[in-house]
Amino acid sequence: MENVKTIRIFDTTLRDGEQSPGASMNIDEKLRIAKQLQKLNVDVIEAGFPIASEGDFDSVRQIAREIKNSQVSGLARANALDIDRAWEAVREAAHPRIHTFISSSDIHLKYQLKKSREQVLKEAREAVRRARGFTGNVEFSPMDATRSDWDYLCDMVEATIDEGATTVNIPDTVGYTVPEEFGNLIAYLFAKVRNIRQAIISAHCHNDLGMAVANSLAAVKAGARQIECTINGIGERAGNTALEEVVMALATRKDFYHLQTRIKTRHIYQTSRLLTQITGIPVQPNKAIVGANAFAHESGIHQDGLIKEKITYEIMTPQSVGISDSHLVLGKHSGRHAVSEHLKKMGHNLTTEELNKVFVRFKEIADAKKEVFDEDLEAIIFEELYRLKDKYKLQYLNVVSGNVAIPTATMQMLVEGHTVQDAGFGNGPVDATIDAIRKITGTNYDLVRYAVTAITGGTDALGEVTVQLKFDGKTVTGRGAHPDVIVASATAYINALNRLEWMKGDSPKIQVEE
């Protein structure tokens, strides 16, 4: 058994996190996230739910093939078809894991599964036994554990460990529990389950009552040694335990928990930014650890204390999570070498071809604004290197607007390689631009969200626009960045259209909670 003072970090951003509305990713994007998670040094990457769709299966298999250091896990319901499919997806991993689950609460047994406790216990045993036939690394989860009868839960945990489960996860599937109660439940399992020390006990908490992080920390205080979490806390409904929060809580309060993780915390901020860029789901400014205001101090008293001694008002350093105190200011006179070296410090080791693409765009941005900051560079990298192969592409946009003019947008786009031009009208310049896009593409999807933020300060800041479109039950997020917020709006909307086109090519997914 590994050092009990070390907490395993099981990241489910690519599985549970992807169930956030608009967070669907293609194979290339998932692989980028997986490689960044490996750089972060997470212990386990839950790469997806292989039975859900061909796209999910392919992405799990590709991640399994390329990730060498972290364990790669595939999720499976407690049936032979799911388990066999999960193994087929992860079998080429250097360290494969099968994660199988079935409900344990009477609520789920009665209304969802319509099975008896005896039937479900038998299926849980059979699922773990089948998974053990493929690998010695098997995780079992009794879904809705926190609303289950505690003694029945003990029976299920004991039975699945007997069958060979090496990790047993206790999910708070609907975010129902509170820290004291959850800690008591974990302690109860340790007191009542005879073979419990033959497995790692894990916690998987949802944030419906805003207590996912607190519940997870209560669990490890009671003996759990794995935390299941996601970057930025994304996930179903109100999300999951935020990786950056539990990791930094354990790192900052070693005096209280006397526990540690293997996470390389200096990569936390870059990982958070990467996920935001890929999904378009923004981080709120006051978000702990990775929010824009997490290390900002406006109070005069606080500023005075920080100048005298940082520890007066900072319990961790920005550098510990990968945020520099000050940004190197780059501008139109900066050369290729300076940009390259600064990108390396930010964690981006680009090829010559990639650097050439980024540098051309950097010069364009530098000509349009006085200073180029780290956040601008992150946006440029995403725009130039990681866009989808687009069905739609913006070529030209001209907008006329004002208090005495009818807002009009004249636009030219490439649609599957063919140039199409049209004009749109609306209540404002953005409305007119979207009208033009809809005419050119022949689409009219529901626009459920439109948000504009400035990536950096100043009137010349890059404007970052996020839009969400909904069609046939699918929600996608598009993102665009440009000094002209109208152009950013157009690129964000077109990005969302391209993501919808990509999603249409994938078979329907089975949605699960755990």
Image (cartoon, rainbow, N blue to C red):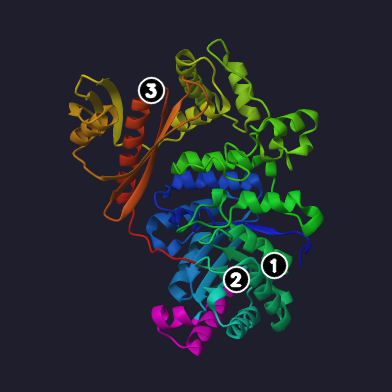
Report the side of 131 relative to 357 (left or right). right
Q: Amino acid at mark 3?
A: Asp
92 on left or right of 492: right
Q: Residues within 10 Å of mark 3 (few under 14, many from 20)?
A: some
Q: Is residue 66 magenta?
A: no
Q: Which mark, by number, is residue 170?
A: 2
The magenta span reads 106-133
Q: Kindly identify the residue that appears in the image at 75 percent across and 59 percent down.
A: 6
From the viewer's side, name the closer residue of 88 and 205. 205
Give the mark nearer the N terminus: 1 vs 3: 1
Return the residue at label 3: 484
Per the model, the C-alpha gap separating discs 1 and 3 is 50 Å
Secondary structure character of the magenta stretch overall: helix
**Left or right side of 2 for 55:** left
Q: From where the camera sits, is residue 466 visible? A: yes
Judged from the image, the secondary structure of the residue bearing numbered disc 1 is loop
First reached walking from the N terminus: tag 3 or tag 2? 2
The residue labelled by disc 1 is 224
Q: CA distance from mark 3 to mark 2?
A: 48 Å
Determine the secondary structure under disc 2.
strand
Q: Is residue 69 visible?
A: no
